[in-house]
Image: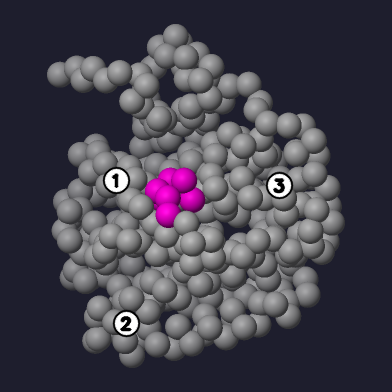
Amino acid sequence: MVLRVPLHHIGSLCFFGIVHPSIPLLLKYAETGRPVAFFDMYGRFRARLTGKTSGNVLLRRDQWHAAQNEQRTLGIARSFVAGKLQNARQVLLRGARDYPNAAARLSPVIRQHEACIESLPAAATLDEIRGLQGECAQEYFGAFDALIRVPPSEFAFETRSRRPPRNRMNALLSFVYSMATSDCASALEGVGLDPQCGFLHAFRAGRPALALDLVEEFRSIWLDRLCLSLVNRRELTAGDFVEAEGGSWRMTDDARKKLLGAYQNKKREEVSTECWRLRFRSASCRIYRRGCWPATYGATSPPTSLTFRHNKRYET
């Protein structure tokens, strides 16, 4: 069966596994600035096709100068972590409210997040900021099982495992994290910023540090909640995952289709921000956040970190 869709209706292309898109198609997407990303069967990012470099070289120069300035780097990194901790706290609060039997497990983690948020302004080095983030992440994922409402025999989480994912839930999380990182890298390039020049994540050859910085704020409130919704509503079941050699897990082709559909629908949801009093779609949050940065590079502090809520109730 062949599906025919007008090209202007497709915003981006994602290929999984071994595929052979035509050269004219790839060139057309490169010319129009729409992202094309390649992933393996496990959802790990492999490559991305981009067209001509957009934006102003002076903007990139200011970005690089900001990354070399300790105070400006600290301010921007602190903003990323503040947004991440605030959003993770909201997910935990909602879990404690919706599932009273999980409140005893989640309450200490919520208090720990609140304490780290209060300690964040006093963090004087990048290592201290990263330490607060790592401490909260460890506790957050330590309590993640309490947010999963299906039997542990189907979707036990236990601990975060990445390469390779050691259970179904980790395979699901790793998949959406890779997708979001690719989207963030494309959004950065679209506004003329360098995805590899980050502030919170350390520089490494080939690493999209700034894209990883950006996705931190969206992990819990957007990506984790999406995965939890699909699992708790049983839109994805244990049968949608297969175990490969070596103990790693991956999704079936049908499961990927379900997830990609839910992922795109999630990006189309309208959200409102508490700091800007604006409404826009989830997918626009990343672009709008990036568009505000050029004005911040001349200041020692970034704008208020991005925390947002959905106007439409999205069950977890």
Q: Which residue is mark 3?
A: 294
Q: Position of residue 241 (x, y in %)?
A: 24, 49
Q: Which of label 3 and label 1 is nearer to you? A: 3
Q: Position of residue 94 (x, y in %)?
A: 33, 76
Instruction: Give the vertical position of 120 relative to 220 (above or below).
Output: below
Q: Which residue is mark 2?
A: 96
Q: Nearer the viewer, residue 63 or 148?
A: 63
Quarter of the image that includes the N terminus: top left
Which mark sits nearer the N-terminus, 3 or 1? 1
> Which residue type carries mark 2?
Ala
Which quadrant of the structure image shows residue 143? Answer: bottom left
Which image quadrant is residue 64 in? top right
On the question of residue 308 being in view, the answer is: yes
Q: Nearer the viewer, mark 3 or mark 2?
A: 3
Q: Dot 1 lies on which element?
A: helix
Is 83 part of what is drawn in magenta? Answer: no
- Left or right of 43 in this view: 300: right
- Picture quarter with the C terminus: bottom left
Identify whether 53 is placed above or below 239.
above
Q: Are marks 1 and 2 in contact (CB under 8 Å)?
A: no
